[in-house]
Image: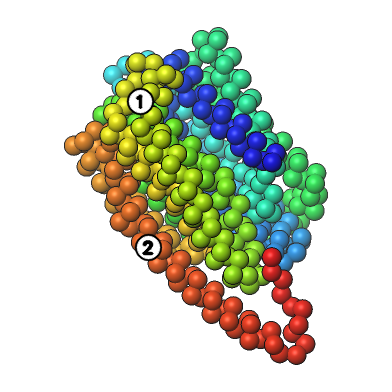
Amino acid sequence: MSASLARIIGLSASLVSVPLTYRYLGGERYGIWMVLTSFIAVMAFADLGIGNGVVNAISEAYGRDDRQLAREYVTSAFVLLFAVGSVLGLVGTLAYPFIPWVRLFNVASHSAASEGARAFLVLFYWFVVNIPLSVITRVQSGLQKAYWSQIVTALGNILSLLGLLIVVAKHGSLAWLVFASTFGTIVATVLNGWLLFDRNPWLIPEWHDYRGDRAKRLLKLGILFFVLQVAGAVGYTSDNIVIAQVLGASAVAVYAVPQKLFSFVSMIVSMGTGPLWPAYGEAMARGDAVWVRRCFWGSLRASLAFSVPLCTILAFAGPWLLRITMGKSLHAPLSLLIVLGLWGIVASASQPMAMLLNGAGVLKEQAVVATVASIANLLLSIFLTKRLGTIGVCLGSLFTQLAIVFPAGLFMIRKLFMRLDMSHTISDRNSVIPCQIGSGGGR
């Protein structure tokens, strides 16, 4: 119950921040902010996929009740990600003076570009600091205790919202606005770390628990997640960048504001399905194929039952909602809202599939599909944006997902279930052998 309340608080804070910041910044400056966040999202692969690898490694160790193995993975992950963050911070600091900000944001005003550049620096260093700290929430997910993370993150969202209100009241710059919006997440992550290690002191990283072979396995797991992250970043988080480069920063807000409205639907679905990732890993380690199959189809039906009516309502009520919250300065055509509604449904349906395949460790196949899909999506989005305007980026993502990702994902899941059924049959046969009674677990 408390975790659900935390999710509602976090989403409410995010919803309030959108009209607050749009009205304060105006179309062009808000567009610059959205481009900045897109650049950071594209850089999400900078952790080399190690963070996602930690989830699988910790859930595997947890399924075996091996505390020493879990601590070795935690320590090794911290060392690796601290090194990654340090190198990235140094490279970004050296490259900063040479970045053509006016061209990057595609704005006519040098003052707007300079303000965006300073804001980027704040956002970049927040991102770098968050790289090693992200191990905390990944471990919580691997231990299936992400509800603590959600509760504390909700408090961080409230802190960030209060910071935004203060900056707006004081008429602060875009850089201060970015700082206020990110400060709460850092505080929340540190508090999450204290809770994690206070309740699980056996997980506290110690240098002598660093293991080269554990780090190597994390890198091996991570490299496949790295490919998935790069593909996802290029294909599905670059929409604002494509619009800025093709149509200009002022056009970004027309897409980004209503897109945020629909993204909350998939965010809610992600909160519900996210814990299934480590749960699938643990269930497969225990050989519980029946639970895996039942849980997947149940989560897919629930995601569709939630997203279809909600996205339909948002699509047709969108013009009224945007007029009430953003004022008359922002006009999003109904056609864009309908396409965003369809994308919201597709994105929500993708979540249960991704959680199952990630938890099962089906990464190589996903990496190949994601690479092909992301390239196709980027090229199609640029082509359609030049001809149709802002609606083009969303159509590119929608077509790619339906034509490539969905069919390939369902094929991989079918193969996975066939393999699980075969393993389950063999296990059933072995279970009738004398002296084997009592082995195994189940849920």
Instruction: Return the residue at label 1.
Output: 319
Instruction: Return the residue at label 2.
Output: 408
The number of callouts visible is 2
**CA gap, disc 1 to disc 2?**
35 Å
Q: In this orientation, does residue 147 appear? A: yes
**x and y percent of residue 267 in the render?**
51, 41
Give the mark, 1 or 2, whose residue is nearer the N terminus. 1
Give whichever of 45, 255 is nearer the camera: 255
- Above/below status of 336 relative to 140: above
Task: Write the residue at 69% across / 41% down.
Answer: 1
Give whichever of 190, 298 is nearer the camera: 298
Which residue is most to the bottom?
A: 434
Left or right, 293 with respect to 307, comes to right
Task: Write the residue at 36% across / 47% down.
Answer: 235
- Above/below status of 175 relative to 341: above
**x and y percent of residue 349 in the render?**
44, 51
Task: Write the residue at 59% across / 55% down.
Answer: 276
Task: Write the residue at 69% across / 69% down.
Answer: 442
Left or right, 12 with respect to 227, comes to right
Give whichever of 114, 178 is nearer the camera: 178
The three-letter amino acid code for the residue at tag 1 is: Pro
The three-letter amino acid code for the residue at tag 2 is: Ala
Give whichever of 249, 425 is nearer the camera: 425
**Location of residue 368 by image quarter:** bottom left
SS assignment at label 2: helix
SS assignment at label 1: helix
Position of the C terminus, as image quadrant, is bottom right
Label 1 crowding class (10 Å Cα cut-off): few <14, some 14-19, many 20+? Answer: some
**x and y percent of residue 437 in the render?**
76, 82
**Location of residue 129 by image quarter:** top right
